[in-house]
Amino acid sequence: MPILRSVWYYLGVMKRGKRPGRLGLTLIELILSLALLALGAVVLAQGFINLRGSRVHVKAEAEQLAELMRTLRQQAITENRPLGLGFPTQGGSRAVSNGYYQLEGEHHPKVLRRVTMARERSVQLSGCFWPEMPFTQPPSSTLSNSSYKLNNWQVPFPQDGVLMFLPSGEVLTNLPTVQGEAAVVLGYAIEAAPGNVGGQPAMQLQRVKGPVVVWCSLFGEVRLEGGLGSAPARVAEVVAAGDSADLPGLTSSSNGNPIFVNQPLRSAPLEVSPPANLNTLSAVANGMSGTIRRKRYLSLKVTARDPDGDALWCTWKQRSGVSGTFTKTEDVRMIYDPKDQMWVATWAWHPPDGAVPGDEFPLEATIEDHRGGSATLSGLISGGGQFRILTPGKLAFRRGTDIWISNWDGSDPVIVARNLTRPRWSRDAGAIVCMNGSFGLSVVTPDGRRRTDVCTVTGATWLSPGSFNAYNNRIVVASESAGVVHLGEVTPWDTAQTPSDWPVDHVLTDNIPPGSRPVVDCKPGDVNQVLVSPSGGAPGPMVLIDKSQPGNSIVLPMTGSEASFCSSGEIVYRSADGQVTRAPLGGPVGATASLSNAHFPRSTLDSSGNGPVVVSGDDGGENCLIYQNGNTLTGRLKLFSFPETCTEPDFAY
């Protein structure tokens, strides 16, 4: 109280002064005394306010930062997108800043908001460590094995401290952690310097005044801790405030158009499922992006990126007047794939009920960023999303040791059954008969859900593939035993049968010698006629057997092997080594094509000569091949590009 003592001393002197009769103070003296008292009070209060106010500001800023962290985490979960906070380091050279910034965007994130902590005395912050605690480098991936990677997202400021809040609720960070928590220290003066943890750059705390620590765990939990209990020696009242790093500027409002990008391992930004067969597409549907069977649907997947890091929306449209149906009728937000760093949208489209083979449907995809940027798929890929309805038809074939089916052009291949061979369709395409080992037959459905082992022939030295008759109620099979060729029938789906013999026919016995391994094919439209031909060796006699007229069966006027009927009643057969021929039953010989190791020809040639022919052959690796023009055996195409051999094809309509 020095000021008050001086005032009272002055008053006492005035009372004892030489001017008698005067008591108290003059007005000027009173004003001066009050002014001195007020000045002293202000000086005392200011010191107290500065001390207490700065601590209050630090705590308030820490609480605001903690609440923002919690908000961003919840927003990332709700909106299914990553959000982040950045703490400037001026390119890794400065340990403290007077603010932080908010990041948004799955790809090239943008600075959308900056927070500057300006009060009567600036509050500083630093994402840092101190050696008194066992800090380590944080993991580079999340505990849930999320595809998000911090180094793919950290631009444009890779050396700044970052907390990245993920849709999973977890956090990725480059800040050092202790027991799974990263520390952001706030104080009204911080001294820190570049250091390292685990060989990686990090900021080391040296001294701090009035600290509050905001802890953020890798699970997104946020808590505050006052002081620095683990390192009290680092808390000091006299601290030289560090040179603060500058906050980056807000991201420019300029906007670029999004772009369609190719998917990894694919050549176009459009993936069609069922996929088109690139071996046959240009010949089957020239200028198209894909093919589709009637009453099937297409899954359309597009991939894109935005140069500004914006979220993207996708819309598919069809030409005016087309009555096909999309699963979605409005633009929908695409899904971001952090692994490949691209936006993905998948739609389904059903062609109209009245679609017929040859109909073409142009479909168009547009992507937008909802900020004025857009791009359209048409023209960026061949055909621009134009699809053609296929002529009906299915193909069964053996891939390796398994049975597969596909569209007749080789598109949409799917597995049906394992460890079966020599598939043959029923006439209605409702079932497939296959060989089960060397002496058994099995029947499977095209979806693979039902399989029945219908017979095993004991005592045989050879069993042929089965062939459905015209009514699909019997399967005809040839076998050899004791040097004699037999024909028999079994019923589909009945188990443990013994093939019942056809009436003995001397034409068959006389002309199909033992050891010729005969194969059979039933004539379309006639349940009584079966074509028998050799296989596995040189061409030989081909015999047409008529069950209803024993003894009237005939030997065809040409030799061959592995013969099968066309829908027209003609036959295709292996006429020589590496040679396939089409011919009427009574001759003359029709078109012939050569192919190395050609065998197993099958056709759907109709009475007008339309329809393809498929055959196994050597194209540099045994495969199923198709002659588009079956009447002339021209227009050969490779059907598949599997690493395994693909053989024994058979058609169905």
Image (cartoon, rainbow, N blue to C red):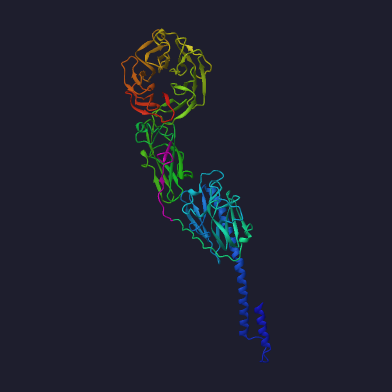
Estimate the x, y position of residue 440 in percent, counting from the top left.
Answer: 50, 18
Q: Is the magenta stretch mostly helix, strand or loop?
A: loop
Q: Residue 54's spot in the image, x, y percent?
A: 59, 65
On the question of residue 189 being in view, the answer is yes
Res. 163 in view: no
Q: Is 176 rendered above or below residue 359?
A: below
Magenta range is 252-272
Q: Which residue lies furthest to the front in this view?
A: 199
Residue nearest the observer in this picture, 181 or 83: 181
Give the tally of numbered discs.
Answer: 0
> Is 43 located above or below residue 290 in the figure?
below
Left or right of residue 95, residue 13 in this image: right
From the top left corner, tell me how far across and down residue 602 is, in percent: 39, 22
Which quadrant of the rendered structure holds the N terminus? bottom right
Magenta stretch: includes residue 153: no
Q: In which quarter of the image is the C terminus?
A: top left
Does residue 264 belong to the magenta stretch? yes
Instruction: Give coordinates of residue 611: x percent, y percent.
Output: 36, 25
Q: Which of 496/522 is in front?
A: 496
